[in-house]
Image (tube, rainbow, N blue to C red):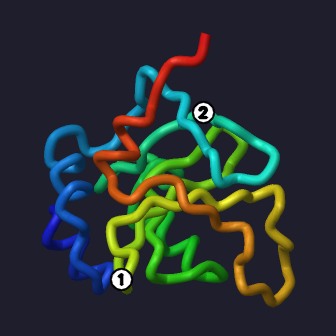
Amino acid sequence: MLAETERALGFKLPVEYAAFLRTSNGGYPTPSDVATPSFPGSSDTTIGAFYSIDAAADYNDLMSRYRLWITDCPPQLLPVAYDDGGSEFCISLDGHDIGSIFYWDYYREEHNVDTNYPNIYPIAAGFDEFLASVTRMD
């Protein structure tokens, strides 16, 4: 399934993320809070779910979300999870920052206009670092 996904994407998945998909194939994390230090005015958010390959529901399916994402967002970023507010955590699939995790803030994005996506913020240098940053806020 990973090879089929990579063919459909036109990108090879970063090693750490591919290992995560082999082990868990997405799902609902516990704990689920993650720091967003580079996100202006915020220090954390909650992961709603990680997308899965071949999920039963389109809203949790990795390829369904990517097809929707690329209609008006950078195609070299793959959404891998969403937060409880509808924003996305993405992994870079190409370029100098391949494997890095970014946070796209849905509420700060200018919708229905031409944009250079200034509301995408770096979160972690790699997927394992991103997973290690997930905590439980008390």
The residue that disc 1 covers is 94
The residue positioned 28% from the left and 82% from the top of the image is 11
Residue type highlighted by circle 1: Asp
Whether 111 is drawn above or below 56: the answer is below
Q: Quadrant of the C terminus?
A: top right
Q: Could you give the CA–CA distance between mark 1 and mark 2, rounded to whole angstroms?
A: 26 Å
Residue type highlighted by circle 2: Thr
The residue positioned 59% from the left and 55% from the top of the image is 88
Whether 136 is drawn above or below 81: the answer is above
**Pointer 1 local density, CA inside 10 Å: few below 14, some 14–19, many at least 20:** some
The residue that disc 2 covers is 46
Q: Dot 1 lies on which element?
A: loop
Q: Is residue 64 left or right of residue 1?
A: right
The residue positioned 33% from the left and 43% from the top of the image is 26
Q: Position of residue 56 (x, y in %)?
A: 38, 46
Q: Is residue 120 left or right of residue 56?
A: right
